[in-house]
Amino acid sequence: THGGFTREFIHALAWDVDGIRASLNGGTIGTSVEVPLLTPTAVYVGMGYNSTQQIQGHIKSIRYWPSRLPDEELIELTL
């Protein structure tokens, strides 16, 4: 909830050596190839990219797959 409005976002994100793929609420896949593939040592859930900004809301669920899902499946997960 923000400013009296309630909105739910369902987001799927995947990355591999070819870049990042993302879908939001069943939308088409957005891509970026300018992000290097890193080996994460920590995941900050609900935090901004620099770990100082917090989301204004709550996270209903988080799911993790150990291998890259196809683009079609990312979209399907966000419907």
Image (cartoon, grey):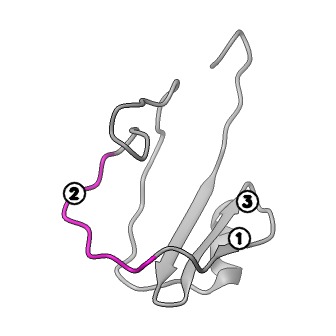
Q: Which mark is residue 79?
A: 3
Q: Residue furthest right?
A: 28
Amino acid type, mark 3: Leu
- Give the residues in magenta: 36-44
Whether residue 10 is in magenta: the answer is no
Query: According to the image, label 2 marks what residue?
Result: 42
Amino acid type, mark 1: Ile
Q: Which mark is residue 45?
A: none
| Closer-to-camera residue (39/58) | 39
- Residue 40 falls in which quadrant of the image? bottom left
Instruction: Name the secondary structure under disc 2.
Output: loop
Q: Quadrant of the C terminus?
A: bottom right
Give the vertical position of 69 relative to 22 (above or below): below
Question: In terms of sequence position, does the residue under pointer 3 or pointer 2 come before the other?
Answer: 2
Mark 3 to mark 2 CA distance (whole Å): 28 Å
Q: Which mark is residue 75?
A: 1
Instruction: Name the secondary structure under disc 1.
Output: helix
- Residue 18 falls in which quadrant of the image? bottom right
Q: Pointers 1 and 3 in contact (CB under 8 A)? A: yes
Q: Residue furthest top?
A: 4
Question: In terms of sequence position, does the residue under pointer 2 or pointer 1 come before the other?
Answer: 2
